[in-house]
Image: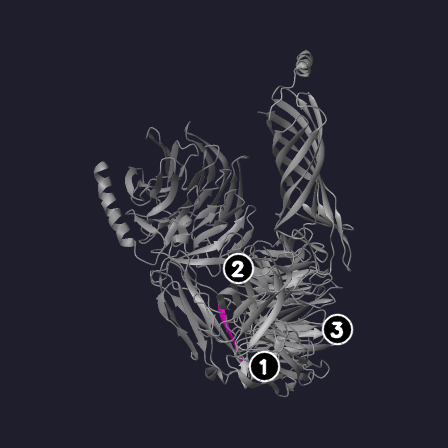
Amino acid sequence: MKSKSWIWGVTIAACLAASAWAGTFGKVVAIGGHASDLALDEGRGVLYIANFTANRIDVMSLADNTVQRSINVPSQPSSLSVSPDGKYLVITHFGNAEAGQSSRNGLTVINLESSAKQTFALGSAPLGVAFGIDNLAFIATATDFTLFDPVLGTMRTLDTLSGLKIKTIPQPAASFPPNITQASIAASRDGLWIYGSTDQLDFRYDVTAKHVEPSFYTSSPPSGPRTVSVNADGTAYVTGWTLNNRTFDLISEFPSAAGTFNIGSQSIDSSRNLIYAEIPTSTDPLGANQKAILQVVDSDNLAVRERLQLAEHLAGKSVLSNDSNTLYSISDSGVTVFPVGNLSRERRVTVSQEDVVFRGSFCDRQAASQEITLLDQSGLNTDFSLTNIPAGVRVSPTSGTTPARIRISVDPAGFQNSRGSTVANITVNSTRAINLPTSIRVVVNTRQPDQRGTFVNIPGTLVDILPDPSRARFYILRQDKNQVLVFDSNSNTQIATLRTGNIPTQMAITFDRRYLLVGSNDSQLLYVFDLETLQATPPVRMPGGHYPKSVASSAGAILVANRVAGPLHTIDKVDLNTRTATQLPSLGVYKNDININTALVASANGSSILAAEADGNMLLYNSNADTFTISRKDTTSLSGAYAASSFDQYMVGNTLLNSSLVAVRQLETGTGLSSGFAFVDQGGLRITAPNAAAPGIIQKVDLQSGTGSGVTRVIEAPLLSDSTGTLPFTRTLAPLANRTAIIALTTSGFTVLPWNYDAAVAPPTIDRVVNAADFSQPIAPGGLITVFGTNLSPISQSTTSGSLPTALADSCLQVNGLGVPVLFVSPTQINGQLPNFDGNTTLTVYTPGGVSDNFNLTILPAAPSVFRISSVGPDGTNAAILRSSNNQLVTPSNPIHRTDTIVIYATGLGRTSPEVPPGTPAPTDELAGVIIPPVITVGGVPVSVEFAGLTPGQIGVYQINVRMNSRIPLGLSVPLVISQGAGSTSLQVRVVE
Amino acid sequence: MRFLLYTLTAALTVLPAFAQKYEISLAGGGSFYQSHTVTNPKGDADAGFATGWAGSVAVGNNMYRHVGGEIRYTYLHNDAKLKSGSTTANFGAEAHLINYDFLIHATSTEATVRPYVAVGGGMKLYRGTGTEVPFQPLSNIALLTKTSDVQGMLSVGTGVKVALTSRMSFRVDVHDYITPFPRKVITPALNSKASGWFNNIVATAGISFAF
């Protein structure tokens, strides 16, 4: 054997060198055979690899990841395990030979201290072996569960099995160990729990109680990759494409799994709450051309954090080192070693923000640009290139190395015919990065004055929106991150994030308004959140194989429409007290057999629940009767908006239905596709759009006549049914309970519309224009200004984006016809930033109500004014001057000392070098200093100005860094004067020694 | 143990005091201030220093049988404070004193017990040492400030020295150090008024060594 080991060493070293190509994660160690199982022996610094086809155990050194020796064993070592005390290695042999040949099923025990080997025959094919903390080997076979004592060599049958279909040897060519044994078994790190999976059965062995609990299942596609990984305390395990809990409930599953046995692997990393998994998907072509991708996902709901490229496919079990820093996985060539603890040092290209939003308007037709950063957080310089750049968008540079600032520019001329939001994704590529970088979503919105609403961009896939009926909140379901985003409807800012099951699909609020229920496409749990605490509460366990896609809560019942892994999709009834659900035996007189795409919605008064099915069926649940009272099918398909009223009316698509679900009105289709509908009192609100890039159309619907009124164009299109038919129904309108606004789920996030969005608006008037720092008259180029007046905006709104828009809440400013970036608008005040020119100018305000009269302004070359900060102390308002020594505001109780350096925050200091375009943050890598230097005196004594220019990262905010000296006078109220060109400003400060 | 204490006490009382020309004293004790009212149209506040501790060192010279003199350095640790109604502002502060006092003893240099009175003068350095914050309570009446203020000082006091050995005495002193209002450390706000003298009573006990 010794003579062979050096040959293996050379072979493996050669393979290692060959596999270390760039842009993939992990190192491949070839073993010259097909591995079927792994076991770590960290005490001896080795990994045992069951080489199924070469009939040996390859022993790989953990120090250098080379196979240094091999142990010859009987035929087909299929599974192995090391005892917790490190004394024994137990190996099972899958020798289930075809009829006519003798069986070679058995097990080998190797005393690792003496190297003594002992073999035992097994009565049937072994499925796997794992040691518990009691140093007894738990062995699953085709006919029983057995406990093996390696010290005594005795076996004890715990339970028997029958009916398992086990493959026989020989098998056709290109069959791999997982295809042949079709089983896997693994123990929790604490050694108290052992889980296994076979073709028809999952099982759990309680090491303490010595009790086996089986759970039979059916699966389509098959549960592959056929491996098992258990979390540290045995409360969850992952097998195939499913994550399950101790009671075999399916917590979440990987979407669109192909179910292949021999491609892929999974491993739970409990220390980081992650799962590393390669799960081939049915949507990708299988085989050699399919990319090998390791997903790093959250261990509770499988939300994807990263995708890493692999040199080759994983092909069986993975085991994690005790310090969780190294993952060993069976792969095509043998084993791949992943330094998961050092992932942060690997080349991974990331984008500083998920999307870039350009808000053009009728006020501004100039090219706009924004910057994002491409990073490799390992600190390495990694190549990148950007492709799929849409027309009208310029990107510079399109290739290079990280870190790199990428300027994305949009020429409005390229979108002059657009009236909504155009969304494009720029692909980020890298040949050396191991990850698949996320693309950059570019949203370009152009609008006309008549288009109402302000959109808040939210990246990702948004699929549902719900207003809270009793709180100033609304909820948005973000499907790609498995999150409910909770927004405060007063400020339209996000206040919480709730974690859901995998691929959440729909929400409902319980009739008592206490809980938010969230269904998912890839979880068999209905998630329940307490709306008072915004905390998760125990989920509802759905019946086996039931995935709660849609949920509705009436006064009488909570119903769930399920995708079922079985012949029929069903509606279940939820018992929230016991957190269980039961499949309804029938839906009244109708069979409980629904379309896979069924949307449920309850009326606000809880009297009924409408079930709209994509195949045209409709059902109505009556709360009083506690059963389904109506079923109709008047069309072959249904899609679009769905809603239920408290006055026995229902809306599906463009059809208004009465209490018998009979179509009573057909709404117009000229405004586009149905997207959202909401019953308000005895009327309705409806939003439609011809396509995703067009403006949305909102209107009020008279339910008696079916006619619309207040037809108004919205800033962008609402979410529309997808063309693939996987999301046929859409709920995109959320009228807030306090009737202050209507929230619509739209192309780039959500759009806020005033409740009276169609009300006539009076034209704006301008009373005065002052600098935004101290509200005094002089203003200067690039300075922040405040416009006071009336009817300046329909609503109050401030921007949260990095670069300032030129229109906000339907209002915009122009100076000499040039759009002014704005920070804040309200009916009486607009804050904005002046363009970089001076002289006599004209300012105009545009709103949906019209255009203001011209307001004449004189912009001085420099007009310094120090910001005032409202303070809680007795001084009321303080100048924004900070002492560098303690970074606190200068006040009488925090006075300037003669040894201090102070920072004065001001605006109106005029042009800078380099010049910074209005509306964009000042650069952080190159200071933008003012062109006209300021002179500062304190008590008449000049002090040294160390820097005067724009504050890095801020828009229109300047800072002057000033060093005091020993000659400045002391006093409670000493004049500090800033002079710049012809402009100056003065304020009083306290100076002490 | 009690027997040993009695023996030691008896031995000390029979020892004749041995007159030496110079002596050095180390003492520690408490420091107490009288507060002053700062007046302002918006309200008044009591300004002063909280009770603190003191440490001092002095070098003395017995010039005559009953008259001596000593130069003394004293460190005082008293936080500055303002109080108006239930609102209080505190600010770390300390003071350094250096003064010369004439000591007029009631008994001659050979006596075991020597009561005395002291009178003299010197300088007192007030220092605000607290952390400056933008918003200090009662800052509309007065401002407690991180700065220094040097004031001339009048010193009066009394005490007694008890000879323990021929070279070592136990002494107890009470001094009143009188300075003008330290306006730099406790600065009256705009429109506030504060004036008068600050009395600082310092009571110490210590040991002096003759040489």
| Nearest to viewer (mark 3 / mark 1) | 1
Q: Tell me the subunit letter for badge 2.
A: A
Residue position for label 1: A813
* Residue A358 magenta-highlighted: yes
Dot 1 falls on which chain?
A
Q: Nearer the viewer, mark 2 or mark 1?
A: 2
Q: In the figure, is residue A431 to the left or right of A532?
A: left
Element on which disc 2 rests: loop
Specify the amino acid type for callout 3: Phe
SS for dot 1: strand
Q: Which residue is mark 2?
A: A965
Examine the structure image and report whether residue A940 is included in the region drawn in magenta: no
The image shows residue A554 at horizontal and vertical percentages of 71, 63
Q: Which mark is residue A647?
A: 3
- Determine the image quadrant of residue A904: bottom right
- Prevailing secondary structure class for the magenta stretch in the rendered image: strand
Q: Is residue A834 above or below residue A438?
A: below
Mark 3 touches mark 2? (CB < 8 Å): no
Please tell me which of labels 3 and 2 falls first in the chain. Answer: 3
Q: Could you classify mark 1 by the number of other residues whose Cα lies within 10 Å: few (under 14), some (14-19), or many (20 or more)?
A: many
Position of the N terminus of chain B, as image quadrant, is top right
